[in-house]
């Protein structure tokens, strides 16, 4: 699995949700809602690993890499 097949969805202070590749300096996308951010990540990494960082700072899997 390459890092191109991974995304992290995390909240921003302004209410938007960022979709970020691991170790990236900038977000790949900023979305208005959590659902839009997850949809973007699934569209761009349909078989990849997608994690979400909750408001409490903990991570959980949205989608695990398909083998």
Image: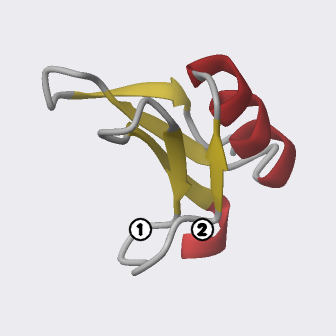
Residue 6: name its quadrant. bottom right
Location of the C terminus (image quadrant) = top right
Report the residue at 53% width, 65% height from top: 27
Residue 1 seen in the current view: yes
Percent from the top left, x then y, of residue 48? Answer: 67, 49
x and y, in percent, of residue 4 in the image? 65, 72
Which residue corresponds to the image point at 51% horizontal and 37% vertical from the top-left? Answer: 17
Q: Is residue 2 visible?
A: no
Identify the residue under disc 2: 1
The answer to whether residue 67 is left or right of residue 9 is: right
Which one is in front, 10 or 7? 10
The answer for how far apart the CA atoms under marks 1 and 2 are is 13 Å
Asked if 26 appears above or below 39 in the picture, the reply is below
Q: Which residue is mark 1?
A: 22
Task: Decide which of tag 1 and tag 2 comes sooner along the chain.
Answer: 2
Q: Secondary structure at mark 2?
A: loop
Q: How many marks?
A: 2
In the image, which disc is placed on residue 37? none
Q: Residue at horizontal 72%, vertical 27%?
A: 36
Element type at mark 1 = loop
Which residue is at the front of the view, 40 or 3? Answer: 40
Residue under the image location 43 percent in, 29 percent down: 15
Q: Position of residue 52 (x, y in %)?
A: 41, 32
**Left or right: 42 as drawn, with respect to 60:** right
């Amino acid at each position: 699995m390459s890092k191109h097949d991974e995304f992290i969805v995390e909240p921003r202070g302004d209410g938007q949700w960022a979709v970020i590749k691991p170790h990236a300096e900038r977000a790949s996308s900023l979305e208005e809602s959590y659902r839009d951010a997850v949809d973007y990540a699934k569209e761009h990494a349909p078989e990849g690993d997608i994690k979400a960082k909750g408001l409490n700072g903990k991570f959980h899997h949205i989608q695990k890499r398909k083998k």
